[in-house]
Amino acid sequence: METRRGVIETPVFMPVGTQGTVKAVSPLELHDLGAQIILGNTYHLHVRPGEKVISRQGGLHKFMGWQRPILTDSGGFQVFSLARLRKVTEEGVHFQNHLDGTPTLISPERSMEIQRDLGSDIVMAFDECPPHPCSYEEASRSLELTLRWAARSKAWWEREAKEDRPLVFGIVQGSSYAALRERSVSGLVEIGFDGYAIGGVSVGEPESEMMRAVESAEAFLPLDCARYAMGLGTPPQMIEMIARGIDMFDCVLPTRIARNGTAFTRHCCLSLKNAAFAEDPGPIEEGCECYSCQNFSRSYLRHLIKAEEILGLRLVTLHNLHFYLKLLRTARGSILEGRFSEFRREFVSNYRPNERTSIAS
């Protein structure tokens, strides 16, 4: 996928830098880990420090010291999950922000303007993410509003930026209803976007329902455009979704569970707080090339975590991000070599599910 800041090889995992930073990790470390692209969030950066502050500092890339591509979420999900006293109208969403209650309006045009000021390389159309569960009628009304907002988002860029504009992605909604997912894809493709994201998943539904929602949308998406599953997922979920044609992923799990002392391995998650690791001289995972595994033992990491030393959560975060980024590079290699089916079967069958890997953890 070509962006104005370089080519991104897919499938790709995008570390989440909601507030202009991937938690506990420097841009230099992200570069060394092989991250091709990271995320920022329109809502959070608008609320603090404000897109105008960032723009006057030279844009988000310069502000945070990251020169590779950045994707920004439209803010739609955060408005509906965090904002207080929100009111949805055709114009957009009126709400009080979650920090100080300041009255705010985000419309499709305003979201695009904020993302322009941030300097994003991939911008997301403004959407409404309906709650789970919701009725067919509620999901249908929300979907039609999202399609109208998507058309306005696309039209804003056509008016404002003819050259050197970012890639613009539409977001598929429709809750758990296959017919609505198909309708959403049809409407978005008619508008025409550079790529398509599948939204409204991993919002409390069972995994089987989440997979069906992805399948309901993916079957109708253009073959020559990037497909992005928003907010997903666990290691086996990502591999299964690659098998279904998904190219792009983001998820807070690698950094979030690291702050609880939990590390990913190719077979399961390890809670390094466990007493069993108190005198374990081995690395988090044998054969792992990350800085943490090459230099520190499970025993030392457990000590840091139990002592609440910042270095402990940083080292586990570095390992988890390395694991996710390498997993997607390995999946890509297996596709290019024609052995993805074998890789998928071996990885998924050998991975032991663990309650700590749930999105809500």
Image (spheres, grey):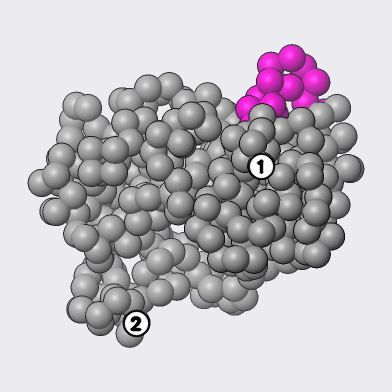
| SS of the residue under disc 2 | strand
**Toward which corner of the image does residue 240 lie, by quadrant?**
top right
> Badge 2 is on which residue?
84
- Contact between marks 2 and 1 (CB within 8 A): the answer is no
Q: Residues within 10 Å of mark 1 (few under 14, many from 20)?
A: some
Say which residue appears at 28% left-offset and 58% top-offset: 45
Above or below 9: residue 184: below
| Magenta residues (range) | 324-341
Q: Nearer the viewer, residue 319 or 18?
A: 319
Say which residue appears at 79% left-offset and 42% top-offset: 282
Q: Position of residue 355 (x, y in %)?
A: 77, 65
Q: CA distance from mark 2 to mark 1?
A: 44 Å
> Badge 1 is on which residue?
296
The magenta stretch spans residue 333: yes
Q: Position of residue 273 (x, y in %)?
A: 72, 63
Q: Residues within 10 Å of mark 2 (few under 14, many from 20)?
A: some
* Type of amino acid at the residue the image marks with label 1: Phe
